[in-house]
Image: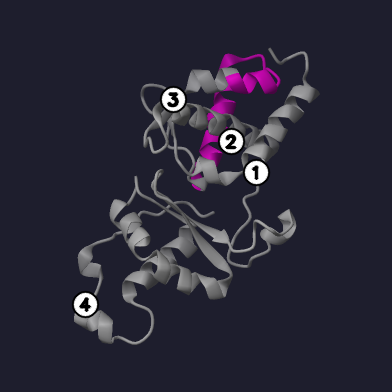
Amino acid sequence: MDEEASMDWQETDVPPMDEAATAPGTPVEVKKLAQELLKCGFIESASDVAAFNAVARLRRELDAVLEPLDLRLELDESRGLAVLRVADAASASPDKAWSHPLVRRQRLTLEQSLLVAILRRTYVVQELESGIGVREVRVALDELLSELQVFLPDSGSDTKNRQRLLTLLDQLKPHGIVGEPDSRGEVMIRPLITRLANPETLNALLAHFREAHPNRIR
């Protein structure tokens, strides 16, 4: 998934209704939304509420544009998230599901995947406490560091351990699931974390680490 790019979405970008109605082919507004989805893979309400609202309003038209490409739109209005999916991904094998030429596979290292699992679990727990649709889910870096060190070997240096965490977070930013650590020592977990990997895969990963390091798990 490419790094998120904010859309400059203004009403003036869309032709007047009489012009749009007489123009041949797909309406300009639908084209722009489809192009943004193909470029970034998702549109998030927190980043561009006008574009997200337009996606919700024009979902049927977007589905018609995406269907010949064997793609579909997954709309999560509670979390304010529109995500592009391969149409047959649910029924296909993992390798086949990612074989679509317009969808780049997200290749994460084991440590990155572990941090994703921890972040996703934190996000879901906060949603259970505050309700689905909460826009600001933040976690302290110290809390993440403590959880990560349960699974990964200690470098022997607090500075190196913290830098490892910051490096992993920086590597995950282009995937659109975390923000930049702030001055309070917290990082925002973004709603896309719920779509990056399914819970079964992430739970299996955590179980693997527990089995591999039984003496480290409290």
- The reply to whether discs 1 and 4 touch (Cβ–Cβ < 8 Å) is no
Mark 2 or 1 closer to N-term?
1
Q: Which residue is mark 3?
A: 129
Under circle 4, the secondary element is helix
**Percent from the top left, x then y, of residue 204?**
72, 34
Mark 1 or 4 closer to N-term?
4
Kindly report the distance in space between the C-alpha atoms of the residues bearing marks 4 and 3.
44 Å
Kindly report the distance in space between the C-alpha atoms of the residues bearing marks 4 and 2.
44 Å
Q: Which residue is mark 1?
A: 108
Mark 4 or 2 closer to N-term?
4
Q: Which residue is mark 2?
A: 116
Q: Image quarter for residue 54?
A: bottom left
- The reply to whether discs 2 and 1 touch (Cβ–Cβ < 8 Å) is yes
- The reply to whether discs 1 and 3 touch (Cβ–Cβ < 8 Å) is no
**Percent from the top left, x then y, of residue 63?**
47, 68
Q: Which residue is mark 4?
A: 17
Three-letter residue code for mark 4: Met
Q: Which residue appears at 45% of the width and 31% of the height?
A: 127
Three-letter residue code for mark 1: Leu
Task: Magenta stretch: give its range.
Answer: 147-174
Magenta portion: prevailing SS class: helix
- Residue 42 is left or right of residue 160, and the answer is left
